[in-house]
Amino acid sequence: MVSRLVLGCGTVGHAVIGSLADRRGELFVFDGDESRVDSLRNESVAAEVRDVTDPAAITLPDRSVDMVVVAGERADRNRLAAIAADAAHPDAGLVVYLGFDATPKDRHRIDSVADRVVDPGAELLSHANSLTESGASQRLQALRQTLQGIDGRLGVFMHDNPDPDAIAAAVGLQRIAEDAGVDSQACYFGEISHQENRAFVNLLEFDLRNVETQSDAEFDAVALVDHSGPGVNDQLAPDTDVDIVIDHHPPTTDVDAGFTDIRPDTGATSTILVEYLRGYGIDVRTAVATALLYGIRVDTDDFAREITPRDFTAAAWLLPNADTDVLERIEAPSLSADTFDTIAAGIRNRQLNGSVLASCVGQITARDTLAQTADRLLAMRGVAVTFVYGYFDGTIYVSARSRRKDLDLGAVLRSAFGDLGSAGGHADMAGAQLPLGLFDAVGEDAATTLTEMIEEVVASRFFEEVHGGTSGIQQGE
């Protein structure tokens, strides 16, 4: 059986581990940081706290190691780990991530022992050269011209109840606007209720405006990030003139804007903003770099879904300026009582049809509790798809997750609910918002009846589409 050993687990290392974990064979990870090792163990990865620079500490006496990957963040530590790996496992293939701030000594010594060296500096140079290509160069010029043509203040609008990718993209575009001499304000409708997202905004001290009415949204120019249409997943008037759209979701309607950059083949909108920041040579402050790195990590599920080389390159470029201590604090917030209540309701009310789980949690107080519940339920044994929904303020909210490679959740939800409201998303992560409509006539005092009526319509539509629809999987999976 093939055995693989990973030494060091920074951002790049975690992505490597995620990829190797899906392959046949044994995987072992050694890292000197106890918190990282605990996190990996929680993900069912065989990890131990060891000194990766000590040949004796990284031996596996009862196993033959076929490949060693050195994937720490610091070049000097990676040099020592590579030397130790060469001594401890001389017959294994050795792949070394150079890391940042490498000295000539680091490069020379790693080159002398490694079978392959991954150099982030060379990747960045290659990417910088690619920016001189006509397409990238034209985009840079077009966005700059659009910004310079704005006379007044720019409103940068995220989608309703924004997630980290939307927030990061907004502050990234603000930094570009600032460099172009344009005053701007990052705005959103709804609320930021997810514990991690609140910690994200508070710890990085971003100035975001929570817009409540259309009159509060009056700006001299408007930009949309992480969505592409006014009135679609935001509360702007549908006829709002839009100057800039930057998004990575496939649009469901025609996009009308002065400048448009939509790339469905990119893992995060934050990645697109990074390419503009790099192309313009703009200095990225720590808070913005941290936000963009977190946005990429969240929307790619820590480099495990819909990831592209561009996302890896963007993350590698951000890493030296990002505050990883803040990221650790963001990712370990306390859960609210409402979140626990919603998770409990999701477990209690679950309907399982094959490997597909649907659950109506009834009336909720914050829509982000649905996403957390969908994530938690996906960890149940035998479950490959979760579909969680609840309602408040006259709207049914849906959050869905999937581990199936043959199912496009975004397409499923668009087909099942597109005629009732807004729906869509990614292949493995999607959502929908449906007006209660006639259900409102039941009244808030008849919550049980209302819940039963919603279950009958919403769950049946989802199961019918996911099992029998053209975008779903077939019965008898």
Image (spheres, rainbow, N blue to C red):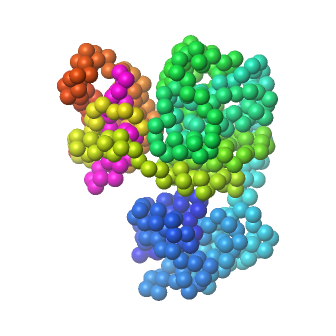
Measuring 73% from the left and 76% from the top, which residue is drawn there? Answer: 109
Which quadrant is home to the N terminus? bottom left
Tell me where residue 431 appears, x and y as whole percent.
41, 34
Measuring 71% from the left and 22% from the top, which residue is drawn there? Answer: 153
Measuring 75% from the left and 19% from the top, which residue is drawn there? Answer: 152
Tell me where residue 394 appears, x and y as whole percent.
35, 21
First to last magenta residue range: 369-398
Q: Is residue 31 above or below residue 365?
A: below
Asked which quadrant contains residue 220, the reply is top right
Tell me where residue 7 appears, x and y as whole percent.
56, 72
Residue 327 showing in the rendered view = yes
Residue 63 included in the magenta stretch of the image: no
Q: What is the number of callouts on the image?
A: 0
Q: Nearer the viewer, residue 356 or 399?
A: 399
Q: Nearer the viewer, residue 4 or 294?
A: 294
Q: Is residue 441 above or below residue 345?
A: above
Residue 376 included in the magenta stretch of the image: yes
Asked which quadrant contains residue 25, the reply is bottom left
Tell me where residue 276 appears, x and y as whole percent.
71, 39
Side of 372 where 70 appears, left or right: right
Q: Nearer the viewer, residue 413 or 453?
A: 453
Q: Nearer the viewer, residue 309 or 333?
A: 333
Q: Is residue 391 above or below residue 30?
A: above
Residue 407 showing in the rendered view = no
Side of 134 where 470 appears, left or right: left
Q: Residue furthest top?
A: 239
Side of 25 where 390 appears, left or right: left
Measuring 42% from the left and 43% from the top, which residue is drawn there? Answer: 428
